[in-house]
Amino acid sequence: MRRDFAMAATADSPRHMTTLGGHTIDRESTLIPRLYRDRELLAWLGDVSSLAAVEVADPLERHVLNILHRPGDTHGAHTDDYPLALVLFIEAPADPADGGLLHYTPRSGALDALDATAERAHHRSGDGYLLRADTTAHRVTALRRPGIRRTVLNFAYTTPDRQRARTSTASALYAP
């Protein structure tokens, strides 16, 4: 489903993308939910992050597909409701000049820091990263030309005491 809006709390943080929410993925795929729930993956996430990583209870947010495929498509500045995001690249612009770059500020949720002190990362198809998404401000830069795509599968994980989302961005991004 196509989404074109700016978050109310951060009016300068546009979201222009096509999304597929976890509830649809659960209905249409057996592989993705099985990978998401893999016990060895959960154990590895816990070891790497030093958190008691568990599945997100909300089926909408467990695993989502975000597709940037038009010039100007972007996933604006934000922090996530849940602590861990494992992001897997299905497609990515080959040239960093084409956009689709991750900007992030480790250990800072300040969205305005993205303009001054953000780290930048270019990814290729087949790459992945694990992000402490609730305490790291992050965004994806806009695509700069037609004919390129950035498609990622995002697995969200939480801790046993953090099953409720702090905000309701999921319904704006992923609900039908």
Image: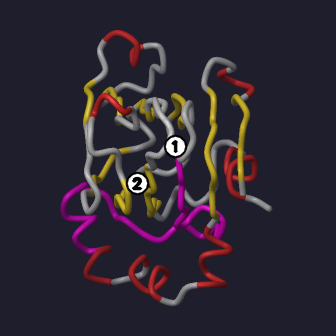
Of residues 71 and 88, which is closer to you in this image?
A: 71
* Farthest-out residue, right: 176
In the rendered structure, which segment of residues is drawn in magenta? 43-68
Q: Secondary structure at mark 2?
A: strand
Color style of the picture: secondary structure
Callout count:
2
**Image position of 28 with respect to 67: above or below:** below
* Farthest-out residue, bottom: 30
Q: Is residue 122 magenta?
A: no
Q: Residue at x 51, y 90 (%)?
A: 30
Residue 107 screen position, x and y as percent: 31, 30
Of residues 19 and 71, which is closer to you in this image?
A: 71
Name the quadrant containing residue 134: top left
Q: Are marks 1 and 2 in contact (CB under 8 Å)?
A: yes
Q: Mark 2: few, some, or many residues within 10 Å (few <14, many ≥20)?
A: many
* Residue 1, numbered label: none
Q: Residue at x 70, y 30 (%)?
A: 7
Identify which amino acid the numbered label 2 is placed on: Ala
Residue 80 screen position, x and y as percent: 52, 43
Image quadrant holding the N terminus, namely bottom right
* Residue 80, numbered label: 1
Name the N-terminal-most of marks 1 and 2.
1
Residue 5 screen position, x and y as percent: 73, 33
Identify which amino acid the numbered label 1 is placed on: Asp
* Residue 85, numbered label: 2
